[in-house]
Image: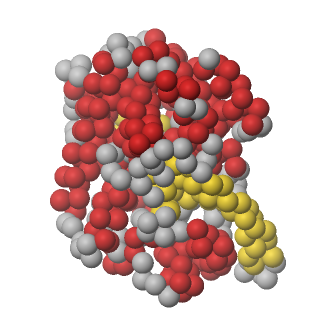
Amino acid sequence: MIEKIYDRILHRNPGEKEFHQAVWEVLESLEPVFARRPELLDESLIERLCEPERQIIFRVPWSDDSGKTHVNRGFRVEFNSALGPYKGGLRFHPSVNLGIIKFLGFEQTFKNALTGMPIGGGKGGSDFDPKGRSDAEVMRFCQSFMTELYRHLGEYTDIPAGDIGVGEREIGYLFGQYRRITNRWEAGVLTGKGVLWGGSQARSEATGYGLVVFTAEMLKTRGESLEGKRVVVSGSGNVAIHAMEKARQLGAVPIACSDSGGYVVEEKGIDLELLKEVKLAERGRLSAYAERSGARFVPDGRVWEVPCEVALPSATQNELDRDDAATLVRNGVLAVGEGANMPTTPEGVRVLREAGVLFGPGKAANAGGVATSALEMQQNASRDSWTFEHTEARLTEIMRHIHDLCHTTAERYGRPGDYVAGANIAGFELVERGMVAQGLI
Ligand code: NDP
C-alpha cells in the first residue's frame, strides 16, 4: 500500500530526487503506524502531507556592481500549517531548485512538530550564489528577493530564517526591505535577526549547540559522554563552528572540519577563535585558516577519513555516503549526529545502523535552530529580550525533550535505539493529530 502511494508521489513530482528520498525515508518508518491505524490511509493523509499547501516561484532580477543585470529564481514552499504559521529558512546556493526546497520544507514540518512549539513547516531560497559577491550586490539581491516575497509573509502567516548562504547580513537586508515596503516594524516576520534589532541571544549558536546536546543525550543511553572524544565535523559554517564550540565546552576535542575546497586536521584541536575570524568575519576559505594556524589542509579529500568517535555532518545533503559510513565504522565511530539536513544517504544510514552506531537524524538533532527561532518569536511578541543563559537553558531543555520523545517513541514501536523511526513517527503523530482535528483542508 505504502509503495503504491509512493509511486503516485514520484509520478506527480518528477525529477525531484531529494524530495523523493526525504518522503521515502519517512514513509518507510511509518509502516508500523499504519499497521496499527489503517484508517489513516483512508483519509489520504500521506498524500495531503506530501503536497505542499502552497508553492511560490518568482523571478529575482538584480544588477551587479558593474551594472550588469542578472536573473535568479526565488522559491518559497509553504508546506504545512496544521500546527502553526509556516516556519523555515531561506537557502542561497547555486544548487537550489524546487526539489531541494520541497525536501527541506517536508523535513521541516516534522522537525518543527518535534520541538513542541506552535510552528508549521516551510522553506525557501534561491539559486543565487553570495560567494564572492560584494555587500552591495548581496543587498540588491536581497531587496529584489523581498520585493516579491513580502506579500506572502507575516508573523501569523510565514516566517523565514537563515540557512546555507543566509546569515545575519542577509537577514538584515531582507528585514530592511520588508520594513520599507510595508511600513511596519514587524520583528516577528523573520528570525535570525541581529540582537540589536529584535534578534535572540543564542540564535546563531543554537543549531550547533543543540546538535551536540542531542548527541550527548544519545551517548548517555550507552553510559558514554563526550569527555575526551575526538569529533569530526563537515562544513565550517554557522552550524559546524558552533557544534565544535559546544563539543569543546563538553570536554570533547574537535579535530577536523571542511568546506567545499577540502578539510583541515589538527590533532590538538581546531583553533575556533581563528576559524571564526577567517570563516565568519572575513568570509574566507578553510585553506586560509590552515595557512595561519599551521593545521594540515587536505584539498578535495573526504573529511570522514579522519578517525574519530563522534561525527557531525553539518554542511549539506547527501555528503556522507555508504563508503564514508564504512570508513567511520572501521575507525571506531560511536555516534553520528546530523547537523545538516539529510546529509547521510540512505545506504550510509543503513551501514551505520547495522554496525550499531548511534545515529541522530537531522530532523531531530538539528532542531535547536528552529526551536530558538520560535523563542525569538516569543520574545518579539512580548517585546522582550532574554539573556544568553536563559535562552540557552530553554534550548537545552527542548533538545533533551526531543531526544526523549524520539527515544520513547522508538521503544513504543518496538525499535529501541532507532532514532530515525522515533523522529519520523513522533513528528508524524503530532502533525497528523493537528491535521485530522482541523478537518479536510
Ligand atoms: P553556512 O552557509 O553557514 O555553511 C555551510 C557550510 O557547508 C560551509 O562550510 C560550506 O562550504 C559547506 N557546504 C555547503 N554546501 C556545500 C556543498 N555542496 N559541498 C561542500 N560543502 C558545502 O550554512 P549553515 O551552517 O547554516 O547550514 C549547514 C547545514 O545545516 C545545511 O544543511 C542547513 O540546512 C542545516 N541547518 C542549518 C540551520 C541553521 O540554523 N543555520 C538549522 C538546521 C539545519 P563553502 O563555504 O565552501 O560553500
Front in this rendered view, residue 126 or 68: 126
407 relative position to 141: left or right: left
Give the residue displayed 41% in from the left and 59% down from the top: 276
- The reply to whether residue 266 is in sight is no
| Residue 234 horizontal/vertical position (percent) | 49, 40
Front in this rendered view, residue 408 or 341: 408
Residue lying furthest right: 68
Front in this rendered view, residue 410 or 331: 410
| Residue 188 horizontal/vertical position (percent) | 40, 70
| Residue 38 horizontal/vertical position (percent) | 49, 20
Above or below 218: residue 415: above
Residue lying furthest front: 439
- The reply to whether residue 107 is in sight is yes
| Residue 61 horizontal/vertical position (percent) | 76, 73
Front in this rendered view, residue 223 or 229: 223
Give the residue displayed 50% in from the left and 27% down from the top: 40
**Coloration mode:** secondary structure
Give the residue displayed 67% in from the left and 59% down from the top: 56
Q: How many marks?
A: 0
Above or below 123: residue 359: above
Above or below 33: residue 268: below
Tell me where residue 300 sits by quadrant.
top right
Above or below 441: residue 433: above
Q: Quadrant of the N terminus?
A: top right
